[in-house]
Image (cartoon, helix red, strand yellow):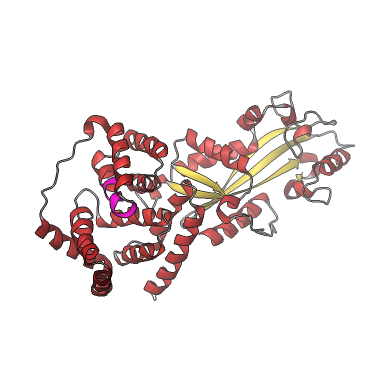
Amino acid sequence: MKVIVLASNNAHKVQEIQSIFAEYKIDMYIISQKDLLGDNNIDIDETGSTLQENAMIKADAIYSLTGLPVLADDTGLEVYSLDLAPGIYSARYAGEHGNDSANRKKLLTSLTYKTDRTARFRTVLHYKDSHHSFSIDGICEGTIIDQERGKNGFGYDSLFIPIGQTFTFAEMSEISKNNISHRALAAHSMALHLSSLQSSHHIPQEISYCILVSIFASLNKAEELSKLLHKAFEEGCTYEMMYEALLQVYLFAGFPAALEALSVLHEVYGSQSHKQLEEYNVELFIQRGQATCKQIYTTVYGKMMNKLHKISPEMSEWMIIEGYGKTLSRPGLSIQHRELCIIAILAAGNWKNQLYSHIRGALILGISPAIIQETCSYLLICNCIKEYHSAMTILRILSEYITH
């Protein structure tokens, strides 16, 4: 699963692109710039001389603010007899940005003595992440008529008839328009291209499911958890891996959360839901727990345990035996992957002190900041936007501290 920020405040665009990506079974979640960054007025100077340059400028700007993969678009109407004008000036052709009526009037005036009224709508989608930066076009050819027709759409829709059609975009239903529109064509092409890049995800798909089910379980979202587990089952994720991810939830979100989640897992996986009980061996758990805990906390292990013992001797003992020895050292899920699930749970619950400790531990274990950010980005899928930003603040502080 990859979270992508759409450099737009248009919720309709998000839904349209998300729907198209779903057709290609691309495991990506689209979030709008506004939903992620809030109502802050982000002023991006679109100083490019082409649609592609402007889309790239927007993508670069939002990527620099978020560090997440970004999709940005720029769209223009290009009339052949006007040397492809209005082009990048489509939204401000008459001078005032966004004055659709004035823009249409100027276009009709510009075409008064033109016999060639052929034109095209063109959308450029630009994608950017830490490894890729590329653009894809979507083009819809057509003709500019001499009188406005239709009440739907916006911009120049009431003047544009796509080739092979008898209705203007403004006379078409939203569904009909989206089937042939320039933006839809660009999104389909982008989906095809991105599907070939899926193997380059930082986090393997089955671990992505482990992280997401951990978040849904900790937030008590049973319906979403069930849907996700059905999807994981269909994708071939093993019962053992899902079981291990949900079992450890009891340590960080409580016994009820884990029990409810494991009940959902049992319902989804049915006959596969069989797990052999590990023998309760306290000496083994202490040995395993101390080794794992020292691996994660390294030089601060002794100080941490002394502090915890002063607060609660029982909690200090249980953390080693129950937490790190009996649960987090179990086979079926590596300690690195367990840490990613734990970070997601703690971030969702906004447990900042514990989150700080576990992000630090993850970095010490060799997990890169990019993987930790991708883990935390799954919070956005669960609408935990403030919690995501809080986790990112902690990650930035620790990344600088540990790197230096």
Between residue 185 and residue 356, name the one nearer to us: 356
Relative image position of residue 261 (x, y in whole percent): 32, 41
Between residue 339 and residue 64, name the one nearer to us: 339
Relative image position of residue 18 (x, y in whole percent): 53, 39
Residue at far top of view = 166
Magenta highlight on residue 248: yes
Between residue 367 and residue 103, name the one nearer to us: 367
What residue is shown at x 9% (from left), y 60% (from top)? 283
Which stretch is magenta? 246-253
Relative image position of residue 331 (x, y in whole percent): 19, 50
Q: Is residue 296 left or right of residue 229?
A: left
Q: Quadrant of residue 142?
A: top right
With respect to residue 121, does 398 lie above or below?
Answer: below
Q: Quadrant of the C terminus?
A: bottom left
Q: Is residue 236 visible?
A: no
Instruction: Identify the main secondary structure in magenta.
Output: helix
Q: Can residue 348 be seen in this view?
A: yes
Q: Quadrant of residue 224?
A: top left
What residue is shown at x 24% (from left), y 50% (from top)? 333
What residue is shown at x 24% (from left), y 63% (from top)? 315
Q: Is residue 384 left or right of residue 97?
A: left
Q: Is residue 239 left or right of residue 378?
A: left
Between residue 24 and residue 296, name the one nearer to us: 296
Count of numbered badges drawn on the protein = 0
With respect to residue 317, does 113 lie above or below?
Answer: above
What residue is shown at x 10% (from left), y 54% (from top)? 281
Relative image position of residue 198 (x, y in whole percent): 41, 45
